[in-house]
Amino acid sequence: MSLTLVERKLSADRPADSDPPVHSPLFIIVFTASCLFVVIVARLWFSTDTSVVNVSSEVMSIVSFVHGMTLFVLLGRDRITMPGYFMASSAAIVGISGLLVIPDPYFIEGARPEVYLNAALFASTLTQIGIGALCLRSDSTGRPEPVVLPLRTVQWAQGAGAVVLTIAAALGDRLEPVLDGVGFSAILLICVATLLSSKGLQSVWNIVLVLGALVTYPTLFISGTGRLRAIALILALAYVFFLRCGRRWMKTVGVILAPILLAGLGAWRKEYEVSLSGDYGNDTGLSSMFVAIGNFGSLIHDSELGRLPTLGASLLSPLRSALPDDLAPHWIPEAIGYELAALTDPELYGTGFSTVASIYGDLWWNFGALGLVIGVPLLALMLDRIDVWAVRSYRRAAQGPRDLLYFVFFASLLGGVGDIVWAGFHTWIVRMYARIAALLLLWAVTFYSPVQNFPSYVSFGTQGRRTPSRCSLSRTSIHSE
């Protein structure tokens, strides 16, 4: 049987030493079919007995969580992948959020009745399962051989990052709205260079440096409203760490620890809200996280009332954000979040308030139910290609500062996957603007730096066969000046 166009695209342009696919067709079929069967049965059960709507929604949420986290662990084997991150994020935004929304009276009795929440969970979970099946089909790149940066490159990256970080912290609010992105890129550059140095995390000093840089980000650059930005930085660093010395059991531990991380982030947000208003309406502090799936339900409801899809117009909104207000063409729409407020929070519409409806709601807003169908192969292709390009940039990272900055860009792009699932393409792209600007500035500096011209060395195993990657590189011959 010949490959479909999508399958050919997914398998094209892979590194020459990619491993053969590790997921058998039988496993992909059985796992995907089992998840689909449970979700469809839960939906049909509700359609014949409306009193079980909440139970039906709970089943779909559980399937979304189990499916997403399972693929996070399986995809990429020892390393973390962009599709794996997407699946884990969907498990949180759809699965965990669905379980949190179901007992919430505001969503059940207010603007988002349970019937539309059920429809949103059904549509989101089906789409997630479809994307997961294609990602399993194309998953073949295991963890590459560890890359070790020359000492000069490490020193340049740490020094350049520290200088940018110091300037950004000193200027503070005067750098708005790019302050967060500049701080993000500077910290990520410092941490990536440290992780890929000859000693990596075997050095106590390196561990202190990475932890100190991570603490600096929420302390100086974001507040309680920046949880996804903090998560993006953590995910980017986790991606780099797993390229160096990841293990599948570590990913399993990450899944177990994820609820603890979410609870901590919720407490952080709750404390922030209380400090502003003295009150908070949600015990978990995670209302902004699970509002996406509820808003998707409102969007489905509005579509039944006659709202037509925008036919992709809102996908142009990142262009508007890149231009000054007086230069932005009127035909470029505002971000979907501002328009969604008219449906979900009409009393706040036009005040600058913005909300989200997840990537699945974004696709529905633009193309209706057809958007979810089209989104399955397109999202799978996008996630797969970004992952392939990230691995390629990692292999070249030791060639000099410019190549290292290129890899940091992809790590930043990967780390922002939570923005895609939570809010759609607009937030993901717009938050990358300032991060890219900082990296471009540093890239320009490399033309005046002699470090770029120094030889670099990459650590490889025995020629002709793959050898196990180790966190310890004591046996590896590393040349640096």
Image (cartoon, rainbow, N blue to C red):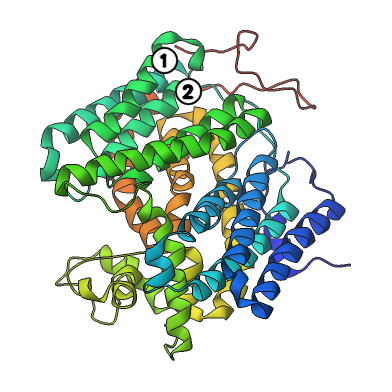
Res 370 quadrant in image: bottom right
Q: Which mark is residue 316?
A: none
Indicate which disc, 2 or 1, sits on the residue closer to the N terminus. Answer: 2
Q: Position of residue 331 (x, y in %)?
A: 28, 82
Q: Residue 162: percent from the left, percent from the top?
A: 26, 25
Q: Secondary structure at mark 1?
A: helix
Residue 235 in the image: state x and y as whole percent. Answer: 47, 39
Q: Nearer the viewer, residue 192 or 359?
A: 359
Residue 478, placed above or below residue 285: above
The answer to whether 5 appears left or right of 92 in the picture is right
Image quarter hosting the C terminus: top left
Vertical relation: 433 (above or below) 443: below
Which corner quadrant of the image does residue 9 belong to?
bottom right
Crowding at dot 1, Cα within 10 Å, few <14 / some 14-19 / many 20+, comes out as some
For the residue marked with disc 2, what is the amino acid?
A: Leu
Seen at 51% across and 38% down, the residue is 258
Q: Which mark is residue 206?
A: 1
Q: Residue at x 42, y 88 (%)?
A: 307
Q: Using residue 276 as the reference point, say whether residue 294 is left or right of it.
A: right
Which percent across, then down, holds residue 458?
58, 23
Task: Answer left or right for 173 relative to 311.
Answer: left
Furthest residue toward bottom: 306
Quarter of the image containing the N terminus?
bottom right
Identify the residue at image location x=37%, y=63%: 426
Give the residue at mark 2.
195
Q: Closest to the observer: 476 or 41? A: 41
Q: Are the residues at dot 2 and dot 1 in contact (C-beta closer than 8 Å)?
A: yes
